[in-house]
Amino acid sequence: MSLLRAATAVRENAHAPYSNFKVGAALVTPSGTIHVGCNVENVAYPEGTCAEAGAIAAMVAAGETEIAEICVIADSPMPVTPCGGCRQKIAEFAGPDVKVTMATTAGVQRVTTVADLLPGAFSQDYMENT
Ligand code: THU
């Protein structure tokens, strides 16, 4: 199954009764395995989690730690971009050149890279004095 199709399918399972904004994310690892996630909101609003975070958690729980490519989709007027926090989460497991596809359910796509989404990402390099 393609990443876009996987993200589209898991989006249906999103728990988004507060925003009504369902998001699906799918990532593939170098092994070829696809991991998916959807946003999971909570009545205590800050406790909600993003689709990308769900896909990353599924990947790590399955014993993998490298994102080869990631895709996110929503019913948005323009391709949905990962939030700032998720950009950092993606950068934890993806190199700067990793492809990020952002899509709308209407079929519009924008392709970019992790480095373009998060220039100047915080990394372990900054902790070398510790
Ligand atoms: N959301 C995601 O899951 N991923 C994104 O890239 C953008 C935002 C979710 C969080 C919240 O459940 C809803 O979309 C509205 O912000």
Image: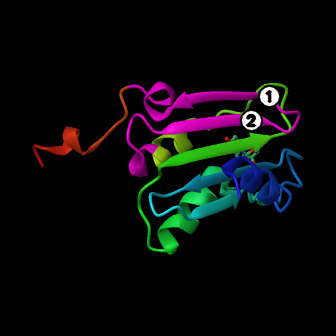
* Figure check: 76 above or below 19: above
Magenta span has 98?
A: yes
Q: Residue furthest bottom?
A: 62
Residue 104 shows in the view: yes
Spot occupied by residue 126 in the image (x, y as percentages of width and height):
21, 38
Q: Is residue 18 left or right of residue 47?
A: right
Q: Is residue 115 left or right of residue 3?
A: left
Residue at the disc numbered 2: 103
* Figure check: 90 above or below 35: above
Spot occupied by residue 91 in the image (x, y as percentages of width and height):
43, 43
State how far apart marks 2 and 1 are (Cα).
6 Å
Q: Is residue 30 left or right of residue 69?
A: left
Numbered badge on residue 108: 1
* Figure check: 97 above or below 21: above
Query: What is the secondary structure assignment of the residue under circle 2?
Result: strand
The answer to whether the beta carbon of the residue marked 2 is less than 8 Å from any atom of ligand 1 is no
Residue density around tag 2, few if under 14, some if 14–19, many if 20 or more, within 10 Å:
many
Query: What is the secondary structure assignment of the residue under circle 1?
Result: loop
Between residue 109 and residue 78, name the one nearer to us.
Answer: 109
Q: Are marks 2 and 1 in contact (CB under 8 Å)?
A: yes
Between residue 119 and residue 40, name the one nearer to us.
Answer: 119
Highlighted magenta segment, given as a residue range: 91-119
Q: Which of the two discs, 2 and 1, labels the residue nearer the N terminus? A: 2
Hey, what amino acid is under mark 2? Ala
